[in-house]
Image (spheres, grey):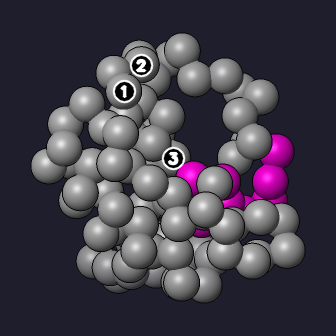
């Protein structure tokens, strides 16, 4: 599971860790909230963005060559799983 432990904001990092643990086992693309059409992909996008900026790096400084952009579905930050789906540290 990707770690947000090194976040600039420890409370936000802990909340992101809990959210990532909840989102990670979800099947890709499911609708979480029909009223708002919030999907698993929305949460994964938010988590990838937060993971990239957890140390205060501006969002626009995140490279488009980020591994999450090269994978068909990276649920949470790519560090959470390798390409075969095995959980990695």
Give the Cα distance between marks 1 and 2: 6 Å
Q: Nearer the viewer, mark 1 or mark 3?
A: 1
Q: Callout 2: helix, strand or loop?
A: loop
Place of residue 59 in the rendered image (x, y in percent of width and height, measured from the top left): 45, 23
Give the Cα distance between marks 2 and 3: 13 Å
Place of residue 19 in the rendered image (x, y in percent of width and height, measured from the top left): 33, 67
Could you tell whether 26 is left or right of 79 in the image?
left
Residue 46 visible? The answer is no
Number of marks in the rendered image: 3
Residue at 70 percent of width and 47 percent of height: 68
Place of residue 35 in the rendered image (x, y in percent of width and height, measured from the top left): 28, 77
What residue is pinned by disc 1? 55
Place of residue 77 in the rendered image (x, y in percent of width and height, measured from the top left): 57, 53
Residue at 85 percent of width and 74 percent of height: 84
Could you tell whether 23 is left or right of 27 in the image?
left
Q: Callout 1: helix, strand or loop?
A: loop
Q: Quadrant of the C terminus?
A: bottom right
Write the start and end of the magenta stretch as one range: 70-78
Q: Which mark is residue 57?
A: 2
What residue is pinned by disc 3? 48
């Amino acid at each position: 599971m990707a770690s947000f432990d090194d976040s600039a904001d420890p409370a936000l990092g802990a909340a992101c860790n809990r959210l990532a643990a909840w989102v990670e086992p979800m099947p890709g693309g499911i609708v979480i909230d029909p009223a708002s059409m919030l999907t698993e992909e929305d949460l994964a996008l938010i988590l990838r963005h937060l993971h990239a900026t957890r140390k205060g790096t501006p969002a626009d400084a995140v490279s488009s060559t980020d591994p999450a952009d090269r994978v068909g579905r990276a649920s949470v930050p790519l560090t959470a799983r390798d390409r075969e789906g095995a959980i990695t540290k």
